[in-house]
Amino acid sequence: MSDDRRIIDDYVDRAGRHLTGPARDRAKAELGEHLSDAAEAGELTEALSRLGAPEEAAATFAELPAAPLARVEARFVAVLIDNLPLAGVTIALLVQGLARTVGQGGGFTLAFPPFVYVRVGDVCVSLLPLGCDTGAYDSAGPLYTLGVPLALAWSIVGLGLLEAWTGTTPGKRAMRLRVVTEAGLRIHPVTGIVRRLSLLLGPFAWLDWVPVVWGDRRRVLDRLVGTKVVAGETR
């Protein structure tokens, strides 16, 4: 393989890492063809200089910067599909709470997403004091101590990494949605996780969606980390 070919293949590969979905293959093909033509004309160095860093070239070939933001209702359906494990645990906690109330009397507290707190002896640790104050799941046993952490791990880490690697999730794929940076590029894994951390706030996670009230299609965390969910071709 010639030096020019190796340079082109390496550059195209690095540019492709910043793209997601069908746009990646199309952009890599177009970029490779463009650089091959430049190499044949003896202008490969100049072409690479014009394109800039691989990430800049990827932004030039990205198809999603101008894609329409996803409809709010489509995003909510995607959220429901993606968080089925968390919804399932919440429903199980509801059933358990109802059974305990019928059998022993009293009441119980329930929220979606569930309150997150940890008790170690007499010490309670929570992101929100309200979680410890309610003691909502003190009698829920493994359903809470194991079920909720596992469901949250999927909703935050699992889905966040999927978005970073593929640009989509099961729910987004079903609704033909994709998450990208403001430039239309693939998001970083850390970004994918951070944009989902509001779930740790229990029911207060819905505050992340407050902008929807005045017609904004981007959540608070979307704006903070520089991402957006768009209607785009999936694969």
Image: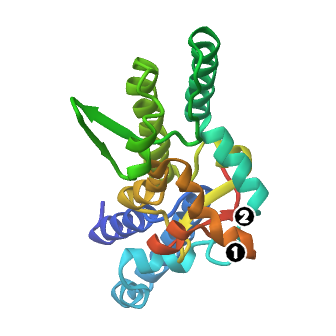
Front-lying residue, 62 or 125: 125
Mark-to-mark CA distance, 1 and 2: 11 Å
How far across and how far down the image is residue 132, in percent? 38, 42
Q: State whether residue 234 is above or below residue 115.
A: below
**Of the numbered discs in the image, which one, if any, rests on residue 70?**
2
* Amino acid type assigned to the residue bearing label 1 in the image: Asp
Q: Quadrant of the N terminus?
A: bottom left
* Amino acid type assigned to the residue bearing label 2 in the image: Ala
Among numbered discs 1 and 2, the one appearing first in the sequence: 2
How far across and how far down the image is residue 200, in percent? 43, 49
Residue reaching furthest to the top: 103
Q: Residues within 10 Å of mark 1 (few under 14, many from 20)?
A: few
How far across and how far down the image is residue 101, in percent? 61, 17
Q: State whether residue 209 is above or below residue 113.
A: below
Query: Is residue 107 rendered to the left or right of residue 192?
Result: right
Front-lying residue, 173 or 107: 107
* Residue name at image x 72 percent, y 43 percent: 174
* Residue name at image x 40 percent, y 18 percent: 142
Instruction: Evaluate whether residue 136 shows in this view.
Output: yes
Front-lying residue, 52 or 212: 212
How far across and how far down the image is residue 45, in percent? 33, 86
Query: Which element is circle 1 on?
Result: loop
* Residue name at image x 36 percent, y 89 percent: 49
Location of residue 50 (image quadrant): bottom left
Q: State whether residue 5 is above or below residue 43.
A: above
Location of residue 135 (image quadrant): top left
Query: Which element is circle 2 on?
Result: loop
Instruction: Evaluate whether residue 68 shows in this view.
Output: no
**Of the numbered discs in the image, which one, if any, rests on residue 216?**
1
Type of colouring: rainbow
